[in-house]
Image (cartoon, helix red, strand yellow):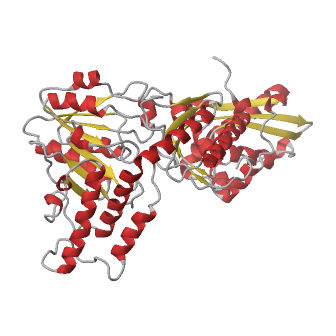
Amino acid sequence: MKYAPTITTLLEALRHAGGVSDMAYRGAAGAASGGVRVAFGARLEGDRLADLRFSAYGCPHTIAVAEWWCRRVTGLPVSALPMWDNRRIADELGVPEGKLTRLLVIEDAWSALMHEWRSARGTE
Amino acid sequence: MFGLPDIRPVYLDYAATTPVAPEAAAAMADCLSPDGPFGNPSSRSHAFGRRAADVVEAARADVAAAIGAAPGDVVFCSGATEADNLAILGAARYRRDRGRHVITSRTEHKAVIDSFRALERAGFEVTWLVPDASGRVSPDQLDAALRDDTTLVSLMWVNNETGVIHDVAALGEIVRARGAIFHVDAAQALGKLPVDVAALPVDLVSLSAHKCYGPKGVGALWLSPRDGVNVEPVLFGGGQERGLRPGTAPTHQAAGFGAAARLVRARLDADLEQAAALGARLADGLLAVPGVSLNGDPVARVPHIVNVSVDGVEGESLLAAMQPVALSTGSACTSLSAEPSFVLRALGRSDQLAQSSLRFSLGRGTTEGDVDLATARFREAVARLREIAAEAAEPAA
């Protein structure tokens, strides 16, 4: 399969892969038996997302998008975190139509992580 | 990709296709030159046509010699897919007055499976044999499936995904004893093991040129001269190729196939020796990685194909991480759906293991250096992807 340059560039430097279990908050979704499983781990400093790490069993698009999301949101105030927009992410990164369900799993893992920290902080 | 070091490209996908041998390319170029045999091989009324016909007939003789057959029993067509269609649809229809039960296996090439599905839609009853975990249909299993109204059995000689070899002699004896026709898809067999159709109880054999260093776009069907072996044509429009494959014979394609077939005969021992040594080296290297298992029978397989499943690694990422080593994944579709290989699923592999499988296939151009480079990249790729996935592991149930 030919991958978009944005995807291959991300895959060359997976700066946020690993370290999930060292993070205070964690969320995961998917199943390896279904071909995709993603976990996120986050460290918050006050209202700021200080660090976001991921681990993924999945196709190159899955791994690249998880890395991209970590880069996109790390350092932002929690109140300013962007909404996950499957279609927009796919268009921006060159993820083919047939892979959109993989992005939904990443979104679910991200949602699980946010639920975890909101529950812990009593904001949900 | 995945931060792995750059390496030189290595081609280990010879089961998908082989490069055209220089001898075959030269034979084709001769045909395509302005003063070559450009005439229509069917135009025997003039010298131009007869010259082209001579080239086609010489090629037919070369292909026949490579499988121990008489030239007149070889029909050229566009490839093994067409040969499979002609054999299966043609034989079933030719013998439909004797019965409408036919037999094949779940691990055949798509060309065979889809031909049998077409027969099912046309009212034939198909028995789909499921091979054992080694990938083989046993003679007892076939014997139990045969009925008085069975007219056709089709089983491949060498499986294109796993390299597993069917015991064609034993299977064919059973088919013949029950009065059915035995078709064998030998697309992956020619050039990978000795093929002598005259010494075997087989009736129809499909061949492909591009799997044995010939050009794409040409293949052949061998029909046994035995009484009762015949097929109805599936294409119409001319009397060429015994009326079974109408259309002007492609002189240059036939010449290329003929030259490749000559090389198969001349080089078979050397090719097998090379493949045995390199295939064992490759399998040893791959299987030394923890969580890696061989798909298919460890003994009854050609050494050219080594198919492994890798635990804890996603198949498409593994294939991408192996770049620039050219391989095939175990997925039936390597693009978007990443559907697990139906062949490996039929052997009892889980969806996950079937999806995370790789087929390495070796050929004449493969060197020890290629094998070692591919093995090293495999070790690195598996380790890196397991590292990326490690913390996403699901909690134990």
Query: In this view of the protein, which residue sits in the foreground, B258 or B116?
Result: B258
**Residue B191: x %, y % from top left:** 39, 48
* Front-most of residues B185 and B394: B185
Outermost residue, left direction? B97
| Residue B114 quadrant | top left
**Residue A70, x across and y down, in percent:** 78, 44
Which residue is outermost to the right? A46
Q: Is residue A62 among what the camera can see? A: no
Residue B243 placement, left or right of B81:
left
* Residue found farthest to the bottom: B34
Residue B387, placed above or below residue A66: above
Answer above or below: position of A82 versus B35.
above
> A116 and A15: which one is in front?
A15
Q: How many marks?
A: 0
- Residue A113 % position (x, y): 75, 33
Q: What residue is at 27 percent from the left and 32 percent from the top?
A: B169
- Determine the image quadrant of residue B41: bottom left
**Quarter containing the C terminus of chain A:** top right
On the image, the x and y values in percent for residue A75 come to 87, 45
Q: Is residue B315 visible?
A: yes
User: Residue at the location (48% across, 50% down)?
Assistant: B14
From this view, report whether residue A58 is shown above or below residue B68.
Answer: above
Picture quadrant where residue B47 is located: bottom left
